[in-house]
Image (spheres, grey):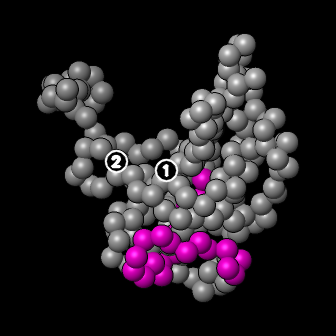
Amino acid sequence: MAGTSGAGSAGEGDTTTEFSAPPEQRTASDDFAGTRQLSETDALLKGTDVADSDEASFTVLERRTCLNLLAGQDIGRVAFTIEGDAAPTVLPVNYVLTHDTIVFRSSLAGTIMRHARGHASFQVDHFDKERREGWSVLATGRCRWVRDEDELARIPQGRLPRPWAAGDRDQVLKILPGRVSGRQISRP
């Protein structure tokens, strides 16, 4: 638990808890550069096995495979912190992955617009409960409001999904993934 600072120099006996920025992110281009899609076979084979048995195989997925899996879905969860809250807020959104960038819509007065700009995480997964297998991908990076007309024009027309939520969702946000990780469990 956090306490008060001792009389020593900075870092010596100091037990206060200070806010620290997330670890440095790998940078991603602000441009919507091309996204290379993997074939379905490649998507399933890319990764490093860390545990394998007769019952199940646990695989850590490579970045390109994770992005390919993100590109194949259209519903994910945005996680962010609201100042003063002890736990993160996680909200579902309809999204598209275009040129390795996660793009989704929000309303101007929405919670995501008010609080998610800055660092955010984005998670997508797919599970087969009957076979007890599936995958999960987590992307973390900068979330920002896309307002520049030229940048909006670079988003392929018709690619932004229609939000399930009622009301106008006419503001566009994007997450530039810095860190991307994924896990897969499969059975023989």
Answer whether residue 176 is magenta in the image: yes
- Circle 1 packing at 10 Å, graded few (<14), some (14-19), many (20+), is many
First-in-chain label (2 vs 1):
2
Answer whether residue 113 is magenta in the image: no
Q: Is residue 171 left or right of residue 154?
A: left
Q: Which quadrant, please, contains the C terminus?
A: top right
Query: Residue at position x 57%, y 64% from top?
Result: 95
- Where in the figure is residue 178, as x and y percent of width and height? 60, 50
Query: Residue at position x 62%, y 81% from top?
Result: 152
Say the numbered circle drawn on residue 136. none
Question: Which amino acid type corresponds to the residue marked 1 in the rendered image?
Answer: Ser
Segment tinted magenta in the rendering: 156-177
Q: Are marks 2 and 1 in contact (CB under 8 Å)?
A: yes
Q: In the image as oriented, which residue stretches furthest toward the front?
A: 130
Q: Quadrant of residue 107?
A: bottom left
Q: Is residue 93 left or right of residue 178?
A: left
Query: Residue at position x 41%, y 46% from top?
Result: 21
- Where in the figure is residue 11, as x and y percent of width and height? 30, 27
Looking at the picture, tell me which residue is in the foreground, 83 or 98. 98
Looking at the picture, tell me which residue is in the foreground, 43 or 126. 126
- Circle 2 packing at 10 Å, graded few (<14), some (14-19), many (20+), is some
- Where in the figure is residue 69, as x and y percent of width and height? 69, 49
- Where in the figure is residue 18, as x and y percent of width and height? 28, 39
Q: Main secondary structure of the magenta part?
A: loop
What secondary structure is found at the residue carrying circle 2? loop
Question: Which amino acid type corresponds to the residue marked 2 in the rendered image?
Answer: Pro
Say the numbered circle drawn on residue 88. 2
Query: Residue at position x 64%, y 79% from top?
Result: 151
- Alpha carbon of mark 2 to alpha carbon of mark 1: how far? 10 Å
Q: Which quadrant, please, contains the N terminus?
A: top left
Report the residue marked by disc 1.
121
Looking at the picture, tell me which residue is in the foreground, 26 or 45. 45
